[in-house]
Image: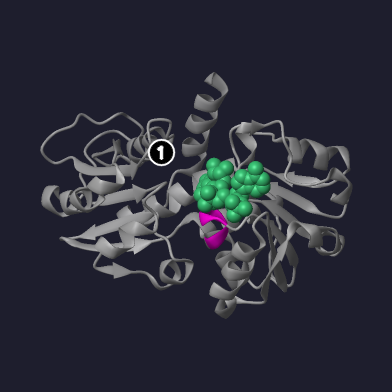
Amino acid sequence: MFRMAHPVGERQELNTQTVLYGVFGSPVMQSKSPLMLNRAFAVAGINAAYAAFEVSPRNLAAAVAGIRALGFRGINVTIPHKVEVMEYLDEIDESAQMIGAVNTIVNDGGRLTGYNTDGIGYVRSLREETGFVPDGKRIVVLGAGGAARGIVHSLARAGAREIVIANRTANRATELAAALAAAGVIRGIGMEALPEACAACDLLLNTTQVGMRPLLGQSPLDPKLLRPQMLVSDIIYNPRETLLLREALNRGAAVHGGLGMFIHQGAYAFELWTGLPAPITEMRQIVEQSLAEG
Ligand code: NAP
């Protein structure tokens, strides 16, 4: 299916053999996915092109029909379509079903299958960058939105001893814990119960928007709750170092930023689409360079 005629690492010329990919979202124009995936295809010597498509909710069904009609091999799905897109696909992978959201679509001859690579990408990044293994660990997750769903599911599947989801809107945390109960020991709490949960945790993880624009320079919790024995992780990657991570470093804790999750969710998608290992080093390098240039 793929042509490997070009020297590895060189940008391909588009032609009639070019295999098409993209990301559907709204807003999507700030996305680093086209930069990252086009670099990955070029490094792997694959004749492919990846573009960003601004798709409004009312056009989502037509856009998915377009995947089949135009023969796109793969599509990433981002905010606000990760849940709604599921109703237009032919099959949903078991994990994505439990998570309740899809961020990657694979087109096999017109048959569309949905996957979720966010959580598994997070766990892979955590292991690679910090050596943290979830098995047997106590974990506190701040936030109960879309990103938390995939991450909590993957951490539970990786053997976490207990996961506590703490959220500003407490009932969203308890609902998410109940929805993922089959994956492991998970409970939801309001922010007032956070001190007790933090006293016993090995990993504290922020999945809220607190720390990025327009909440830049804010932290999702009182820094007094941070302890040197904890690993503190933030899935925000712009800025690379949030106030939460700075405060954690000040208190002697180890930290883990969000860029690795972004790289690895894209790497998993690349692997689902091509069956080849993703060139992670080069993918990371081009995204880091773009973030540094602002
Ligand atoms: P979402 O579904 O809208 O969920 C947002 C969560 O943040 C909710 O739990 C919400 O609490 C909480 N929240 C928002 N504003 C808050 C505030 N001012 N104070 C306290 N809590 C607040 O969003 P999402 O899709 O999960 O994304 C969340 C973050 O993850 C974003 O910053 C996004 O950029 C990042 N992300 C990173 C990656 C990556 O690859 N690194 C991937 C996906 C997402 P309530 O329920 O109380 O509203």
Q: Which residue is drawn at 70% across and 55% down?
A: 131
From the top left corner, tell me how far across and down residue 61 is, in percent. 22, 53
The picture quadrant where one finds residue 275 is: bottom left
Residue 255 visible somewhere in the drawing? yes
| Amino acid of disc 1 | Ser
Q: Which residue in the structure is indicated by mark 1?
A: 33
From the top left corner, tell me how far across and down residue 146 is, in percent. 51, 55
The picture quadrant where one finds residue 241 is: top right
The residue sitting at the bottom extreme is 182
Above or below: residue 1 compared with residue 287: below
Disc 1 is placed on an element classified as helix
Q: Residue at x 33, y 43 (%)?
A: 23
For this view, does 238 lie left or right of residue 25? right
For this view, does 112 lie left or right of residue 71? right
Q: Residue at x 80, y 62 (%)?
A: 193
The residues colored magenta run 145-149
